[in-house]
Amino acid sequence: MHQTFPAPASIDNRGFRFDHLELWVGNAKQAAYYYCGALGFEALAYRGPETGNPDTVSYVLVQNDVRLVLTSSLRPHGPIGAHVARHGDGVRAVAIAVDDAVAVYAHAVANGAAPVYAPQTVRDERGEAVLATFATYGDTVHTLVQRGAYDGVWLPGFVPLDGSTFPSRPVGLTRIDHTVANVGWGEMDAWCDFYTRTLGLAPLISFDDRDISTEFTALKSRVMQSAGGGIKFPINEPAHGKKKSQIEEYLEYYGGAGIQHVAIQTDDIVATVEALRRNGVELLDAPASYYEELPARVGAIEEDVEALRRLSILVDRDDRGYMLQIFTKPLQDRPTLFLEIIQRHGALSFGKGNFKALFVSIEQEQAKRGTL
C-alpha cells in the first residue's frame, strides 16, 4: 500500500542542488573504467554481492563536485536489465539534494508526481540518510537525497573503493550545470507545468524553432530552474523541419523520453578539452567559418581565439558576461547520451548564439549514421 505523507502547501526550493546522477548500464565495471580513464573520474565507493547486495553492482565515481553512480544488474531479468535493453546505457535517476526529503516528496506526489519509492531512512554505523523517488518523463526518475549528518563514504550500504581501482586521468570537471531532457511531440509544456507543480521550478528562458533551427531541422526548448539556481532542467521537444531532427533521432534510439545530455562545468575549458582529447574522448567539430565572426559577435574574451578554433570550443555572450562550451559525441554506440563541457564567465545563458553551429555539427554526425 502506498504510504501517504502530509504535503506542504508550497515548497522552498532555494537550497535544491544536484546530488548525483545514477546511470543504469550494461556493464558497470567497464563503464567505470571508461569514465575514469577518459572523462577523469575517480572511484569512490562500491555496492555489490560482497556488501550483501546480490543482484546488482554500483560504482560511485567523483570528480570535484560531480558525482555519478553506475549501476548494472547481475541477473538477466528485472527493471535494470529491461531498462538497458530498451534504452542502452542512460541516466535513470537525477538525484536532488534537499533538506527535507519527506516534505518535498509529499508535495510532489500531492501535485501529480507518480510515486516510485516512498521516503525511507537508511542507516549504518556512520549515520543515516533519507531517500525518496518519484517518476518523471519516460523511465527517468528523481531521487530526493537528504544526507543530514551522514559522514560515510557515500550512503549506507556502500563501502570505500581505493582510488586506484580504475586508472584515472582527471580533466578538471567541477560541477553539474544542467541536465537536458528530450520529450515527445507537444509534450514540453506539460512537463514544464509538471515541474512547476511538483518542485516549484520556474521558467528561466524559452527557445522556439526560430531560435533553434537549420536548413533541415528544428526543435523547441524551455529551461526550468529552482529559485536558487542550483537546479536547471532544459526540456526539448521536436519541431517540424525538412528532415529528422536530433530530438527525433534520440527518441527513436533511446526508446522514448529521457536525458539527452548532461552539462558539466569547468574552470578552464581549454585545459579540460585538451585533456579530454588526449584521453581519447570524441568531441564535435565546429564549422571553420564559425570563428571568422567570433570577435565581432562576442567582443573581448580572456581566452586565445586561436586555441578555441583549434579545439572547436564555442563562445556566446549575454548581458551578464560570456560562456564557452563544447559537446562530446555520444558516449556509447547508440546516438543518445552525450556531455556538454561549459565554462561560465558571468553568463547565465545556454549558448543561443551557438545553436546554428552546434546543429550543423550534429547534423553532420546524423548524416554519417544515415538518420538525417
Image (spheres, rainbow, N blue to C red):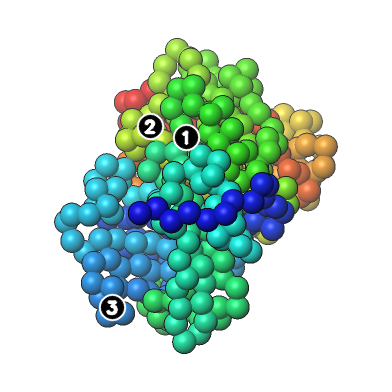
Does residue 291 appear left or right of residue 171 in this picture?
right
Q: Which residue is mark 1?
A: 182
Mark 3 crowd level (few <14, some 14–19, many ≥20, 10 Å Cα): few
Mark 1 crowd level (few <14, some 14–19, many ≥20, 10 Å Cα): many
The quarter holding residue 196 reads top right
Image location (x, y in percent) of residue 337: 42, 44
Q: Which residue is mark 3?
A: 52
- Label 1 vs label 3, nearer the camera: 3
The quarter holding residue 54 reads bottom left
Q: CA distance from mark 2 to mark 3?
A: 37 Å
For marks 2 and 3, the one nearer the N-term is 3
Mark 2 crowd level (few <14, some 14–19, many ≥20, 10 Å Cα): many
Name which residue type carries label 1: Asn
Badge 3 element? loop
CB of mark 2 within 8 Å of CB of mark 1? yes
Q: Which residue is mark 2?
A: 251
